[in-house]
Image: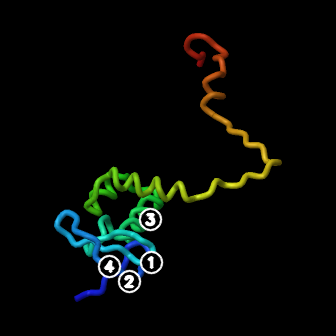
């Protein structure tokens, strides 16, 4: 028989604590967490890491990654969004001014010098 391990703290000291949905329920004596002896839900951690690497390379969409890994595109989006929240905001020094130039605006705002067809 395999040894029971708490899913929250990893403690090995637990007692029976009823039945839930047909499975024996246990309570950890260390942290008080209630758990069952079933395997964890969700996808493996390495699949999530692979998702981030594929998206970070810049040439795969959420749906393409989802098809490749056999998961929902919504799950891929949620994994990437959760990891993005963990990244701190970049520090920009106060003495740097950012200036964006739009070449198309400059090109389109020019007025034509002649009206009609140009002379040859």
Which quarter of the figure has residue 27? bottom left
Q: Residue furthest right?
A: 95
Q: Who comes first in sequence, dot 3 or dot 4?
A: 4
Q: Who comes first in sequence, dot 2 or dot 3?
A: 2
Q: Is residue 88 visible?
A: yes
Q: Residue furthest top?
A: 115
Q: Who comes first in sequence, dot 1 or dot 2?
A: 2
Q: Is residue 39 visible?
A: no
Q: Are marks 1 and 2 in contact (CB under 8 Å)?
A: yes
Q: Which residue is mark 4?
A: 15
Residue at point 37%, 73% (across, down): 7
Callout 2 secondary element = loop
Locate the N terminus by quadrant: bottom left
Q: Are marks 2 and 3 in contact (CB under 8 Å)?
A: no
Residue 42: where, in percent of width, then height?
31, 64
The alpha-carbon separation of the residues under discs 4 and 2 comes to 7 Å
Q: Which mark is residue 53?
A: 3
Q: Which residue is mark 2?
A: 13
Q: Are marks 1 and 4 in contact (CB under 8 Å)?
A: no
Q: Who comes first in sequence, dot 1 or dot 4?
A: 4
Residue at point 46%, 56% (across, down): 58
Residue at point 45%, 78% (across, down): 30
Q: Residues within 10 Å of mark 2 (few under 14, many from 20)?
A: some
Q: Residues within 10 Å of mark 1 (few under 14, many from 20)?
A: some
Of marks 3 and 4, the one in the foreground = 4
Q: Determine whether, in the image, residue 118 is placed left or right of residue 18.
A: right
Q: Which residue is mark 1?
A: 30
Residue 24: where, in percent of width, then height?
22, 72
Callout 3 secondary element = helix
């Amino acid at each position: 028989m395999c040894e029971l391990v708490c899913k929250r703290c990893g403690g090995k000291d637990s007692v029976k604590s009823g039945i839930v949905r047909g499975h024996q329920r246990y309570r950890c004596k260390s942290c008080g967490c209630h758990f069952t002896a079933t395997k964890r839900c969700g996808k493996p951690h390495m699949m999530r890491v692979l998702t981030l690497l594929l998206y970070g390379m810049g040439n795969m969409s959420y749906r393409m990654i989802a098809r490749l890994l056999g998961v929902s595109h919504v799950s891929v989006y949620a994994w990437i969004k959760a990891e993005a929240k963990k990244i701190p905001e970049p520090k920009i020094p106060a003495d740097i001014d950012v200036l964006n130039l739009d070449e198309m605006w400059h090109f389109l705002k020019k007025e034509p010098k002649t009206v009609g067809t140009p002379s040859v």
